[in-house]
Image (cartoon, rainbow, N blue to C red):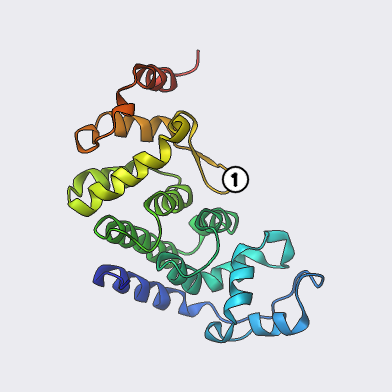
Amino acid sequence: MPCSDQLITALDALDRAFASEDPFPVTGCTFCYSEQDFAELSGPLHLIADDLFSSVAAEVPDHWEDFPRLYRRLVPRIIRLLVTGRLHVGEELIASRLNQAGWADWDLPLTEALRGVWSAWWQSTLETHPSPVPVRDALSVIAVSTNSLRPWLNMWTATNTPAADAHLADLVTDVMYKFEITDLRMGFYEEYDATAELLGWLLTDVRDRVIDTRLDAPFLHEHLQATAQPPS
């Protein structure tokens, strides 16, 4: 499925922003990776084999001598494959790895470029149904990596289109299974507690756009009130 022009522009801007990240000698766990793997990771990004690339994108940080630098250098290719649904790694895991790499503290041109991709990807997702990455997974990646959910829900509210509503129906079907919405955490390590924000949004902002009587269950409103109350 082709990317939107806005997303293509954002991905190209990401490539330019990270072009200053030069290759460096990569070292790490010799039990899991060979010298040939290290040599490949130390060379041009486009020459890294897909299988090795996916493995490194998902790998735990302590497998590398300089994980933040390695992940930062790999970001343009990781993100391009991620948003087009071609990475073959759990999407939520990538958000967690980005946070472990400390992406929010990178140089401003890098963080701005990545935030630009998040915004363009989210808008592109809302405007296309089905999308390369399921809407819940896309929302989770963006919310966990930016440590914010409400701005992206606001974008969804403002995108009142058949595609956005189809995604909304998909999300509700997903999170209402066994009423997961009452304890919904996002991220590979469940870093982000989305329950109150997402439930409140579903019960108020977009309730008239969802045909699902389960959202009318009284206990959901009671649960929302309880979660919204500050601890005593």
Q: Position of residue 111 (x, y in %)?
A: 43, 62
- Looking at the image, residue 46 sits to the left or right of residue 181; the answer is right
Compared with residue 215, is residue 79 higher up or lower down, i.e. above or below? below
Residue 221 occupies quadrant: top left
Front residue of 109/122: it is 122
Amino acid marked by disc 1: Tyr
Horizontal relation, residue 146 to residue 124: left or right = right
**Dot 1, how many residues are within 10 Å of its Cα: few (below 14), some (14-19), or many (20+)?**
few
Q: Is residue 25 above or below residue 64?
A: below
Q: Residue 177: x, y in percent?
A: 44, 35
Q: Residue at x 30, y 43 (%)?
A: 169
Q: Which residue is located at x 52 percent, y 53 percent?
A: 92
Q: In this figure, what is the number of numbered marks? A: 1
Q: Nearer the viewer, residue 127 or 39?
A: 127
Q: Position of residue 131 (x, y in %)?
A: 34, 61
Q: Residue at x 58, y 57 (%)?
A: 97
Query: In terms of depth relative to the viewer, which is nearer, 226 or 180?
Result: 180
The residue pinned by badge 1 equals 189
Depicted 25 relative to depicted 99: above or below = below
Residue drawn at the location 64% of the way across and 80% of the way down: 41
Residue, far right: 31
**Residue 74, picture quadrant:** bottom right
**Which type of secondary structure does the marked residue at label 1 adopt?**
loop
Where residue 224 appears, x then y in whole percent? 38, 22
Query: Nearest the camera: 232 or 40?
Result: 40
Left or right: 20 in relation to 138: right
As drawn, the residue found furthest toward the top would be 232
In this view, 75 is above or below 43? above
Quarter of image, res 9 = bottom left
